Amino acid sequence: MGLSTGFPRWWELVATAGVPFLTLLMVVLLQHTQNHDAQATHLKLDELIRSSHGASDRMMTVENASPEDLDRIHESFERHASSPGDGRRTKPTSRSA
């Protein structure tokens, strides 16, 4: 750029500053869209839980739980899944925190 291409120096500065700004703008836009889609998915799942007669609705607000609560719930599910007599034996999975 610059003198070799005939563009003024200010144009190079605008391009140098504008590209990162546009990149940041696109990242924010994509993140907003993903958050919107995730919220819509949660609402759809909540509706399915509410419409199922045998389903428990105790997990409907689990996204507001603390990490410690989520770990406790996960351990409870693992114990329930591997308990004898339910016919669904699973091997324990290791989770990295």
Image (cartoon, grey):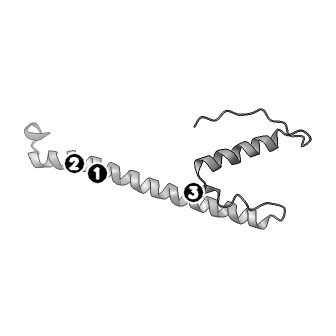
* 2 and 1 marks in contact (CB < 8 Å): yes
Q: Residues within 10 Å of mark 2 (few under 14, many from 20)?
A: few
Residue 92's label in the rendered image is none
Residue at mark 1? 21
Near-viewer residue (33 or 63): 63
Residue 53 as seen in the image, left or right of residue 30: right
Give the residue at x 61% y 47%.
Answer: 68
Q: Secondary structure at mark 1?
A: helix
For the point 64% across and 48% down, the residue is 70
Residue 22 picture location, percent across and down = 31, 52
Q: What's the residue type where badge 2 is placed?
A: Ala
Q: Quadrant of residue 75?
A: top right
Q: Which residue is mark 2?
A: 17
Residue 59 at what x, y percent from top left? 70, 57
**In the image, 92: left or right of 29?**
right
Cα separation, mark 2 vs mark 3, equals: 32 Å
Query: With respect to residue 94, does 53 lie above or below?
Result: below
Q: Could you tell me which residue is drawn at 9 percent across and 43 percent down?
A: 6
Q: Which mark is residue 38?
A: 3
